[in-house]
Amino acid sequence: MKLVVGLGNPGEEYARTRHNVGFVVADRLAQLAGASFSAKKFAAELAEARLGPERVWIMKPQTYMNHSGEAVGAALRFWKLGLDDLVVVHDDLELDPYRVQLKVGGGHGGHNGVKSVNAHVGSPEYARVRVGVGRPPPRMDPADYVLGKFAKGEDAELDLCVEQAVEATRLAVELGAARAMNQVNRRSRAAE
């Protein structure tokens, strides 16, 4: 069994914000798997699905971004899952907009949701699907930038990026992060 977590903030006011791209990917992954977020546990919405041979719980923590790790840690402990069973999808300021990258471990890069997950699972050594949102314009607070909405003209690029992130997540679940990284990151570099 695997746990896929899309990071974001609950509430309509955060829909379509850069910071909620993890929720968007989780929603699309559940949709493609024919699953719905019908369960509520660990202060999160959960959808049970199958990705290839793997049973997967897709999670959207409802604790707000800065406390996402509470839900993730509780779920890992309850289901007795290890860090190699965890895939977290989140926005990343350090990646160019719409670029998708898969990595294991590393720093949180100032991302409070990732920082919270690291603290509550005891390590950063889990798979992360990083979805690039780019850097804010000069003199703009990064928090304001990530809480800003994608422009309507960005729909096509965002949709393609979400599909790439869904595919990266699926590969991480089905192949394991190490094997999936070669495919995902090679594609991401080729698209540059």
Image: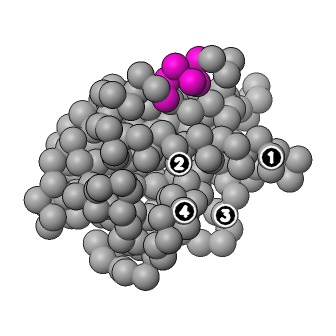
Outermost residue to the front: 53
Percent position of residue 71, x then y: 30, 63
Horizontal side of residue 66 vs 167, given as left or right: left
Q: Is residue 28 above or below residue 148?
A: below
The vertical placement of 182 against 50, above or below, is above
| Residue occupying image coordinates x 58% and y 24% | 188
The secondary element bearing badge 2 is classed as helix
Task: Using the image, tell me which numbered label, if any, was put on residue 166.
Answer: 2
Tag 1: residue type?
Answer: Ala
> What crowding class fits label 2: few (fewer than 14 Cα within 10 Å), some (14-19), or many (20 or more)?
many
Q: Which of the two discs, 3 and 1, sits closer to the camera?
A: 1
Which one is in front in this view, the residue at disc 4 or the one at disc 2? 4
Closer to us: mark 3 or mark 4? Answer: 4
Q: Majority secondary structure of the magenta segment?
A: helix
- Look at mark 4 in the image and give the residue it sits on: 32
Marked residue nearer the N-terminal end (2 or 3): 3
Q: Residue furthest left?
A: 80
- Label 4 and label 1: CA atoms lie apart by 18 Å
